[in-house]
Amino acid sequence: MVMPHPSASSPSQPVIVIGAGLSGLCCALRLHEAGRDVTVFDQHDRVGGRIATDVQDGFLLDRGFQVLLTSYSEVRARLDLDALALAAFRSGSAIQTNKGVRVIADPFREPWTAIQSLLSGTLSLRDALRAYRLRRALLSHPPATGSANDILKGSGISESLQASFFRPFFQGVTLDPDLAVPADYFAFLFRMFATGAATLPRDGIGAIPRQLAAGLKPGSIRLKTAVRTARARHVVLADGTHVDAAAVIVATEGSAAADLAGTPPPSGHRATTCVYFAVAGPPPFTPRLLLLNGTGSGTALHVCVPSVIQASYAPPGHHLVSATVLGDASEDVHNKVRADLRAWFGDTVDEWQHLRNSAVPRALPVLRSSGAVMSRPGFERAQNGVVVCGDHLATPSIQGAMLAGRNAAEEVLRETAAG
Ligand SMILES: Cc1cc2nc3c(=O)[nH]c(=O)nc-3n(C[C@H](O)[C@H](O)[C@H](O)COP(=O)(O)OP(=O)(O)OC[C@H]3O[C@@H](n4cnc5c(N)ncnc54)[C@H](O)[C@@H]3O)c2cc1C
């Protein structure tokens, strides 16, 4: 609904949502369910924002290594998980060490593997007990202050197990090399991994926003439409068109929200690059586990064979290997990764075909706080009257983005119901 400006706002005017990432889509869906007319604008030619999957030569290449955790409450409430045809990783991780690969399993879900780890000396009894104590503490009494790093330091778990397992695992999730994320968020992530499954959808991670978008009224999402200015009752598109609205919600990344709404930008961003290789023939690593870099050197934080988890990630007769690198990586990072992985998999890596380096310089907003962040509503009202939401106001995660969108919609529904 495009109208000349100015005009009085009326209930027949749509609520405008700027951004078709998970926050914007969840916000729009909640408004749609409440009977509101919604228009979503996104500058890109697809929905999903930071969640996307590229198809190359029959391989599914997610833009950065991402997993969908089935324990996220918003995921369970909002997504049709059966339709996504999820395939799950095993719990725990494999660790590439200088002496070979060892597996760390969750004793509550894979007791036999955990016992084997103890019997083989892969895990000491002392570390097993300390890890059990940490798990119990994080699941029952999430800490309200401090950082993930503080929690690990105080856990009594040996430096070697921290360095080979806990740190690379949670660095991969938070993209934070210092693990300075708040302790309550760390406890939340720990609980999500301990109680749910890490999964990949059959059609790639990009299937998630596509499913959400399909729940909206046809025509309500306008792609390739950047918004230049946002105000409480109207927006101005990049081509100068004024569009009136009953309310305006800015569901963009934090830095774009700062431009549109004047809210403080995130204090920085976490970058990551996912290096993809195609492998003809059998997979180089068969367990349905992430393979963490516990060698103490090298470029990749972890390696995965997504096609072992979810066969659709590679065409028949092939496998897909992904290697995740933290921070900004050079354009030839794949050469360094290939050189490192020779020590892991042998000279066979020279036969792997490099597909692409999927670099995401602004993958996650930096999350630093000395207090608790899990109670954040995920939205705020800007001084110019718009409602701003997104992962930057909640937690930098699928759960955070989805929750932020839903809560922002509730806020607008409350406000517009009150007149
Ligand atoms: C590499 C990577 C790995 C991740 N791994 C995980 C993981 O394993 N598990 C997990 O839970 N989370 C993970 N995340 C986090 C999760 O993907 C994000 O937190 C979430 O997708 C953010 O959604 P959002 O809607 O808040 O923002 P975005 O997805 O950034 O959406 C914002 C949208 O606003 C649009 N926009 C911006 N400005 C304008 C404008 N002026 N006009 C119109 N449109 C505009 C953008 O085009 C974009 O579509 C990962 C993220 C990345 C990038």
Image (tube, grey):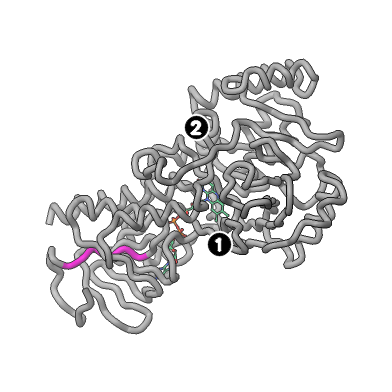
SS type, badge 2: loop
Expressed as whole percent of the image width and height from the top left, the position of residue 170 reads 62, 40
Q: Does the rendering let one see residue 183?
A: no
The residue that appears at 63% across and 61% down in the rendered structure is 358
Expressed as whole percent of the image width and height from the top left, the position of residue 92 reads 63, 31
What residue did someone put label 1 on? 54
What residue did someone put label 2 on? 196
State the extent of the magenta-drawn residues as a range. 13-18
| Left or right of 347, for residue 96 | left
Of residues 4 and 394, the one drawn nearer to the viewer in this rendering = 4
The residue that appears at 78% across and 38% down in the rendered structure is 96
Could you tell me if the residues under marks 2 and 1 are in contact, i.e. CB atoms within 8 Å? no
Expressed as whole percent of the image width and height from the top left, the position of residue 152 reads 65, 31
Of residues 287 and 216, the one drawn nearer to the viewer in this rendering = 287
Mark nearer the viewer, 2 or 1: 1
Of residues 274 and 219, the one drawn nearer to the viewer in this rendering = 219
Magenta segment's dominant SS is strand
